[in-house]
Amino acid sequence: MGGTCGFDWVVAHPSGLFEALGLEEGVHYEVVVTTFSEDGSPHAAAMGCRVVSQPLAVLLKPHIESQTARNLLKTGRGAVNVAAPEYIVEAALDLGVVSMSFGVGEVVGAPILCEALAVSEFLVDEAVRDDVWLRVRCSPVSLRYRQAPARPYSRSAALLVEAAVRLSRVEPFLSINRREEALRLLSEARALVEDSARLAGGGRLGLLVSAVRERLYSLERRIPP
């Protein structure tokens, strides 16, 4: 795991999350959350987040049985990484299709995704458990972003992100004996994957679609009738 992932970052105050990145308050954004596991290795997970301004905070909701939840409770720190859709899919399912590399942030030493378009390290202020989710309120303590050219919007990638996020929740719901919820997620993911495949074309996105479809089949085989 290398340093701070290069030198082409623009550094800004954390309050610039809204202005610099064009975020809107309360909107659900899909990001990659990076944390350190107990053995010191970086862990990446696709996750929804919201940013609020009064006071400035990042709101996360990992599944209570997830590695991210355990890491946040143990270390109290992490990073939100704004990344292209293929990295979100990879982080959701750990497919081994898209390569990800990690560095260490400069403020609280949280792991960061080197391929991210923007990164904000955070400290956990509050973590509240319920039967399914860990509701986490975090204070952003840094902001770095790249002045990268805009990419065209891809419906296929957006659909694949939604499919991957649903599939990433199947095993956690099975672990708490929520079989019907797991089956619903599989059914929704199946429809999304097929729509994504229809629009994907070839290249890396096509490889991701195939890998997500194989993961879906694998999960289906593990659920008894």
Image (spheres, rainbow, N blue to C red):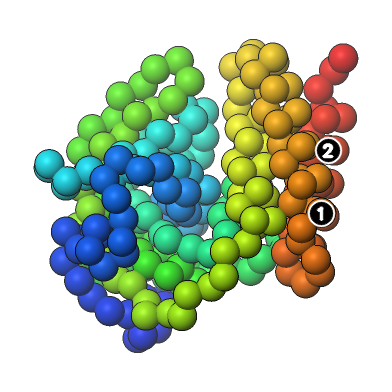
Q: Residue at horizontal 85%, vertical 17%?
A: 224
What residue sits right under mark 1 in the picture? 198
Q: Residue at horizontal 32%, vertical 80%?
A: 9
User: Which mark is on residue 218?
Assistant: 2
Q: Nearer the viewer, residue 36 or 213?
A: 213
Residue 221 percent across, percent down from the top left = 87, 30
Q: Distance between the residues labelled 1 and 2?
A: 21 Å
Total numbered circles = 2
Q: In this view, does 77 lie to the left or right of 168?
A: left
Q: Residue at horizontal 46%, vertical 52%?
A: 31
Residue 131 percent across, percent down from the top left = 45, 15
What amino acid type should be assigned to the residue bearing mark 1?
Arg
Where, by quadrant of the figure, is residue 210 drawn?
bottom right
Where, by quadrant of the figure, is residue 105 drawn?
bottom left
Q: Which of marks 1 and 2 is in front?
A: 1
Considering the numbered disc 1 on the image, is that residue within a helix, a strand or a loop?
A: helix
Q: Nearer the viewer, residue 5 or 152?
A: 152
Q: Do the residues labelled 1 and 2 touch (CB within 8 Å)?
A: no
What amino acid type should be assigned to the residue bearing mark 2?
Ser
Question: The C terminus is located in which quarter?
Answer: top right
Question: In this view of the protein, can residue 208 be seen by the observer?
Answer: yes
